[in-house]
Image (cartoon, rainbow, N blue to C red):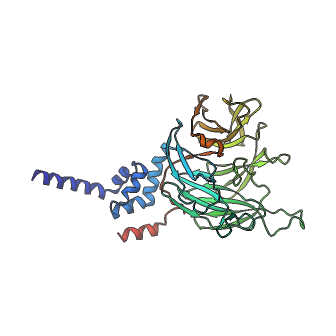
């Protein structure tokens, strides 16, 4: 009798917890994301709650405090992602769940658990990659939920397009800015006409809109044949613009905000071929590695009034000039620096280097890294409140 009574009290108490949704959200949002996905199958009410935008937002806010790095080799044969912590420990590895019949895929950026990827379409009947008449494919992917969204095809381009992704103002809203060379303009017949244009895809509308001609286009990145080095910081996207004299060296910075307003920023007179734009603790920063001197400079942009660069620190790198810096990404005060065969974490606050020992298979596969936060965000943008309400009523 006591056992039965105790069980009834337990069930009553748990029923009170389930009815108080804010309490249940607080509990479930603290679980590892793999456990959260399992909890969706417990009952319809839990499935609805975990699928709601309010829960997704709450889980993301907690998850942001435990970000790590996502590292991947150039995906030609090995289609895997590696989750790496600050100590260089591989937490887990995931097979890319949307890569069947893909040509080599390139990750362009990572934000709040979503990855933006690009690849050439694969023509199944010919067994080859098509790169002439068909445009690059763009996908927004969530590796932990194993979901992906193929973005509608953009305008035809005479050259490889460059893109950048802006997120906000709400959680899980984004815009994709795509720079292309208009295919209908013949520069041979009209050499004075500017064919460089920009269009933007909005997750709110699910379609592209053409902005029109732009004076500058982002320079292509040396580490990625399909991408461009860009970073999203405080509501703006930043790309390098190549020097007129040398397409491999940045000459200035191109910016665009969520209102689709473009601008440019001058660079300090300290830029090399191995320079990277990063988000260093919420500030746009420039990392410039001088191979000959084996020196790394870190500049911070002070944009409170007129944009002004300030030298944060200058330090000796722990690798020789034969080991060029191939990729740099930031997380809080740390820089993850990848060279031809080495991996280092640099603490910019205490000016301390740590070498990481990752699998040797990365050394020949052009690895890149991004900061990563596990989330349940939808690849298509925010959940429609009307649909969410209808789903609730149908339970």
- At 47% from the left and 51% from the top, the residue drawn is 60
- At 36% from the left and 56% from the top, the residue drawn is 39
Relative horizontal placement of residue 71, taking residue 38 as reference (left or right): right
In front: 265, or 178? 178
Q: Can residue 284 be seen from the camera position used here? A: no
**How many callouts does the rendering have?**
0
Residue 77: percent from the left, percent from the top?
61, 53
Which quadrant is the C terminus positioned in?
A: bottom left
Please say if 11 is above or below 387. above
Residue 374: percent from the left, percent from the top?
49, 50
Please say if 314 is above or below 192. above
Residue lying furthest left:
1
- At 78% from the left and 66% from the top, the residue drawn is 182
Residue 233: percent from the left, percent from the top?
62, 47
- At 62% from the left and 56% from the top, the residue drawn is 117
Relative horizontal placement of residue 68, taking residue 303 as reference (left or right): left
Q: Quadrant of residue 173?
A: bottom right
Q: Can residue 94 be seen from the camera position used here? A: yes
Relative horizontal placement of residue 164, taking residue 272 as reference (left or right): left
Residue 191: percent from the left, percent from the top?
89, 63
């Amino acid at each position: 009798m006591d056992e039965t009574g105790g069980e009834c009290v337990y069930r009553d108490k748990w029923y009170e917890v389930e009815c108080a949704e804010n309490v249940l959200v607080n509990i479930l949002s603290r679980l590892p994301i793999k456990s959260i996905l399992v909890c969706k199958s417990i009952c319809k009410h839990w499935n609805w709650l975990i699928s709601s935008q309010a829960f997704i937002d709450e889980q993301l806010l907690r998850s942001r405090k435990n970000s790590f790095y996502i590292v991947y080799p150039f995906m030609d044969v090995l289609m895997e992602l590696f989750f790496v912590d600050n100590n260089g420990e591989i937490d887990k590895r995931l097979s890319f769940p949307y890569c069947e019949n893909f040509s080599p895929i390139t990750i362009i950026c990572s934000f709040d658990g979503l990855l933006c990827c690009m690849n050439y379409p694969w023509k199944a009947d010919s067994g080859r990659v098509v790169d002439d008449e068909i445009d690059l494919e763009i996908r927004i992917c969530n590796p932990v939920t194993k979901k992906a969204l193929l973005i509608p095809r953009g305008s035809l381009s005479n050259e490889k397009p460059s893109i950048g992704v802006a997120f906000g103002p709400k959680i899980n809203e984004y815009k994709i800015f795509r720079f292309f060379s208009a295919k209908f303009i013949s520069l041979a017949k009209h050499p004075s006409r500017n064919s460089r244009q920009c269009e933007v895809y909005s997750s709110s509308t699910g379609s592209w809109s053409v902005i029109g001609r732009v004076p500058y286009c982002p320079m292509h990145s040396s580490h990625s044949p399909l991408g461009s080095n860009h970073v999203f910081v405080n509501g703006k996207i930043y790309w390098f613009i190549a020097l007129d004299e040398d397409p491999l060296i940045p000459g200035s910075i191109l910016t665009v905000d969520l209102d689709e307003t473009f601008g440019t920023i001058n660079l300090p007179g300290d830029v090399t071929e191995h320079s990277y734009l990063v988000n260093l603790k919420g500030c746009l920063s420039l990392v410039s590695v001088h191979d000959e001197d084996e020196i790394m400079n870190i500049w911070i942009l002070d944009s409170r009034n007129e944009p002004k660069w300030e030298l944060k620190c200058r330090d000796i790198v722990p690798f020789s000039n034969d080991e060029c810096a191939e990729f740099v990404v930031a997380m809080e005060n740390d820089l993850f620096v990848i060279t031809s065969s080495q991996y280092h974490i640099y603490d910019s606050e205490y000016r301390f280097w740590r070498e990481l020992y990752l699998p040797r298979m990365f050394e020949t596969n052009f690895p890149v890294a991004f900061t990563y936060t596990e989330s349940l965000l939808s690849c298509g943008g925010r959940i429609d409140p009307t649909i969410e309400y209808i789903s609730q009523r149908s339970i």
